[in-house]
Amino acid sequence: MKKKPILLLSLIIVLVLGMLASVLAFTSVANPLLASFGLRKVQVTPTIMPHPTATLTPSPPPSPSPTLEITPTVPSKQNAPAIQAEAAYLFEVNSGKALFQQKNDMPLPVASTTKMMTAVLALENGNPDQRITVPEAAIDHVQGTDASTAQLVAGDVLTLLDLLYGLMLPSGADAAYTIALVIGDGSVDTFIQMMNAKAQALGMTQTHFVDADGLTIEGDVSTSTADDLVTLARYAMTIPLFAEIAKSPAYEVQATSTNHRYTWPSRVTLLSSYEGLLGIKTGYTGRAGYCFVFAAVQDDHYIIGAILHDTSLSQRDIDATALLNWGFAKLKGTL
């Protein structure tokens, strides 16, 4: 009977020791304690579950930057005429498009095309009806030169409007000098300063005037570019009286008790032969060659152009005609 309690007690001790071993197996004191009971800690290596591989969708490539279409600053010369003038510029006013460019930003002597600025300042600073006495100085100014004149007579009393026609149509250097004296308050130098100030105000950055008529042939001369002259012409043609004078084929001043009779045909010979021509201004000196600033309208297309340093008077008209024909054909889509 005594063996059963002893056996029961032994079983209880074994169970307790087993439970104690399980607890201590995961503590820092497990090994020495288990060793004291002749037991060994079992090293458990944790199982590491692999991270699922992510399925990556590649980002779409960035959209390319749009290519900017740059409009060429120089217009196409496809089928453009070959001209003899050294420099030329053709501009369509209504669309604001340059049609033809050839050395259009090269400063060159501009001869009597200078008188366009003289006319603009006279119209903006004078009264067309004011009466002006032709000074002897104006006659002396052209004496002994090859300058074109209005054949003014000193002492004649003419209106400013008369003088403007004498300035623009026969390209009178004597008329230019007279106007410069009046508008410049008795000083041609003051008038020239006004000319250069107006040029700057209009954005004619490559223009420099030294006289009111373009007559100077030695030393510093009045210079501009085909581009600047077109700028000047575009502005001048917005002045109704300038436009009226520019397109006139002739002008006559009747003789009175205070003036002689004058008849002035225009030097713009194409006025009588080119359809839609609005005239404007020619010019010539040995240094400048033959120059021409012109304007014409056909089928609502309005072209202003300039040619500088052409080889002859006839070639000047040939080049202007060729450029206008080509420009209008290009605008009408008939090229």
Image (tube, rainbow, N blue to C red):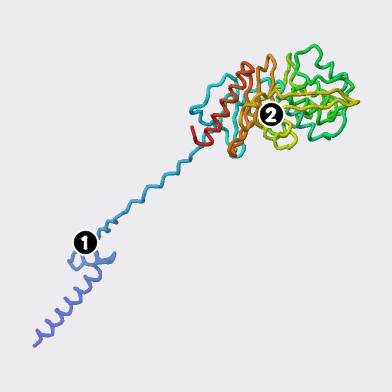
Local packing at callout 1 (Cα closer than 10 Å; few below 14, some 14-19, many 20+) is few
| Of the image marks 2 and 1, the number of the one nearer the N terminus | 1
How many numbered badges does the structure rendering display?
A: 2
From the viewer's side, name the closer residue of 201 and 143.
143
* Residue 222 rendering spot, x and y as whole percentages: 72, 21
Helix or strand or loop: what does disc 1 sit on?
A: loop
Q: Which mark is residue 115?
A: none
| Residue underneath mark 2 | 280
Callouts 2 and 1 close, C-beta under 8 Å: no
**Residue at 88% across / 30% down in the picture?**
131
Q: Which residue is mark 1?
A: 43
Secondary structure, mark 2, is: strand
Q: Is residue 30 left or right of residue 128?
A: left
Horizontal and vertical percent position of residue 171? 74, 22
Examine the image and state in which quarter residue 315 appears: top right
Type of amino acid at the residue the image marks with label 1: Gln
Q: Is residue 304 left or right of residue 266?
A: left
Q: Residue at x 68, y 23 (%)?
A: 282
Residue 40 rendering spot, x and y as whole percentages: 19, 64
Locate residue 245 relative to residue 259 in the image: left or right.
Answer: left
Which dot, 2 or 1, sits closer to the camera? 2
- How far, Cα to Cα, is label 2 from label 1? 110 Å
